[in-house]
Amino acid sequence: MSNGSMRCPRCTKYFLEPRKLMCEVEVDYCKSCKGIWFDCDELEKISDVAIRKLRSSGDARDTDLACPRCDDRTLRASHYPQTFVTMDTCDACHGLWLDGGEFKEVVAVRSHLRETGELQEYAPVTGFKGSLLRFIEESIEALWSPG
């Protein structure tokens, strides 16, 4: 839950304020830059098109933003799956920062993907582990496919 004393990772001089969104989930919001901090798994409670169990991807890069929850941890930037939105996540507390307007963009794009039958519920596994899992899946499919 929100504690009201976290600094905005983008503005740094402003404190995040608690704000209730859908389903009575309280997130932390910056009045200045309009960014939103989601504690672990809050986004999936708010939006039915959110990626489940979202974590930073293998291609994540360090940013100059500090985690508002952990304070001394650096947020890592990567793309929100199936969108062009850059999300900033904390590997320690698994919180997620979206800049102003990005929450609406994620919901709009992923809602459209659901309507077209292309929505992925879980983030793809990346890196060596992802490659290995895809190889295993393809091998199993080849064994079971007639022909």
Image (spheres, helix red, strand yellow):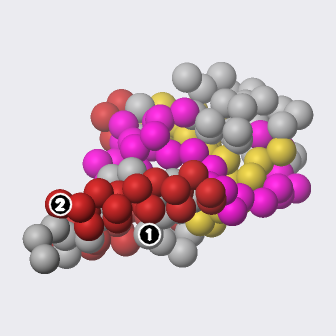
Earlier in the chain: of badge 1 and badge 2, it is 1
- Rendered view: 9 above or below 82: above
Q: Which residues are magenta?
A: 40-67
How many C-alpha atoms fall within 10 Å of the one at disc 2: few (<14), some, or many (≥20)?
A: few
Which of the pair 143/47 is nearer the observer? 143
Which three-letter amino acid code belongs to the residue tagged 2? Trp
Measuring 59% from the left and 65% from the top, which residue is drawn there? Answer: 79
Residue 104 drawn at (x, y percent): 44, 63
Q: Which residue is mark 1?
A: 82
Residue 92, picture quadrant: top right
Residue 90, picture quadrant: top right
Measuring 71% from the left and 59% from the top, which residue is drawn there? Answer: 60
- Number of marks in picture: 2
The alpha-carbon separation of the residues under discs 1 and 2 comes to: 29 Å
Measuring 40% from the left and 56% from the top, which residue is drawn there? Answer: 136
Say the numbered circle drawn on residue 110: none
Residue 73 visible, this angle: yes
Element type at mark 2: helix
Residue 45 drawn at (x, y percent): 36, 37
Residue 19 drawn at (x, y percent): 51, 37
Which three-letter amino acid code belongs to the residue tagged 1? Gln
Q: Is residue 74 left or right of residue 137?
A: right
- Rendered view: 112 above or below 106: below
Q: Which residue is mark 2?
A: 144
Q: Is residue 60 magenta?
A: yes
Measuring 48% from the left and 71% from the top, which residue is drawn there? Answer: 83
- Magenta span: predominant SS is loop
Residue 10 visible, this angle: no
Q: Is residue 37 left or right of residue 6?
A: left
Q: Nearer the viewer, mark 1 or mark 2?
A: 2
Q: Quadrant of the N terminus?
A: top right
